[in-house]
Image: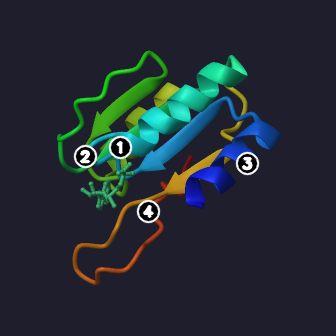
Amino acid sequence: MDLLIFQEILCETRPLVIIETGTAAGGSAFFFASLLDLLGTGEVVTVDIVDECHVRHPRITRFIGSSTDPDVVEQIRVRVHGRPWSSLILATAKSMSSGKWSCTVPSSL
Ligand SMILES: C[S@@+](CC[C@H](N)C(=O)[O-])C[C@H]1O[C@@H](n2cnc3c(N)ncnc32)[C@H](O)[C@@H]1O
């Protein structure tokens, strides 16, 4: 159901950049990149503290590190810089301590 909703949001908003926190194996990043292929524009910028993603796609740019690390935030900011504001931000990182979903979107982006 989530993927169907994301698909509708992407088709409506046609984001130039999607920032995803929590790449994991890259399943959702690849799904979003494939949708952007159909839309003909856009990039997925995805970040994770672990490097376990073996998915490769020309629309996916990966960063390794914490989405709350200022250095990582700066790298993502530079990557996004110069393009219109990212119209969709996905916070998929899960708090390891609480086990609850948490929003770890860099506030400076
Ligand atoms: C449920 S998984 C993400 C699922 C993924 N989007 C997919 O398509 O399967 C949550 C991920 O968030 C990552 N994560 C947790 N805290 C993070 C943080 N502060 N910054 C970046 N990634 C984080 C974890 O390493 C884990 O891979």
Residue under pointer 2: 65
The three-letter amino acid code for the residue at tag 4 is Thr
The three-letter amino acid code for the residue at tag 2 is Gly
Task: Describe residue 15's horizontal placement relative to residue 60 as left or right.
Answer: right
Q: Residues within 10 Å of mark 2 (few under 14, many from 20)?
A: some
The three-letter amino acid code for the residue at tag 1 is Val
Q: CA distance from mark 1 to mark 4?
A: 11 Å
User: Does the Cβ of the disc 1 residue fall within 8 Å of ligand 1?
Assistant: yes
Q: CA distance from mark 3 to mark 4?
A: 20 Å
Q: Please name whichever residue, 35 or 95, is drawn nearer the observer in this view of the structure.
A: 35
Q: Quadrant of ligand 1?
A: bottom left
Q: Please name whichever residue, 88 or 5, is drawn nearer the observer in this view of the structure.
A: 5
Q: Which mark is residue 57?
A: none
Query: Does residue 45 appear anywhere in the picture?
Result: no
Please report the residue visible at 54 percent of the width from the left and 37 percent of the height from the top.
32
Q: Nearer the viewer, mark 1 or mark 2?
A: 1
User: For numbered disc 2, what is the local secondary structure?
Assistant: loop
**Colour logic:** rainbow
Q: Position of residue 83 (x, y in %)?
A: 67, 25
User: For numbered disc 3, what is the local secondary structure?
Assistant: helix
The three-letter amino acid code for the residue at tag 3 is Ile
Residue under pointer 3: 9
Which comes before the other along the chain, label 2 or label 3? 3
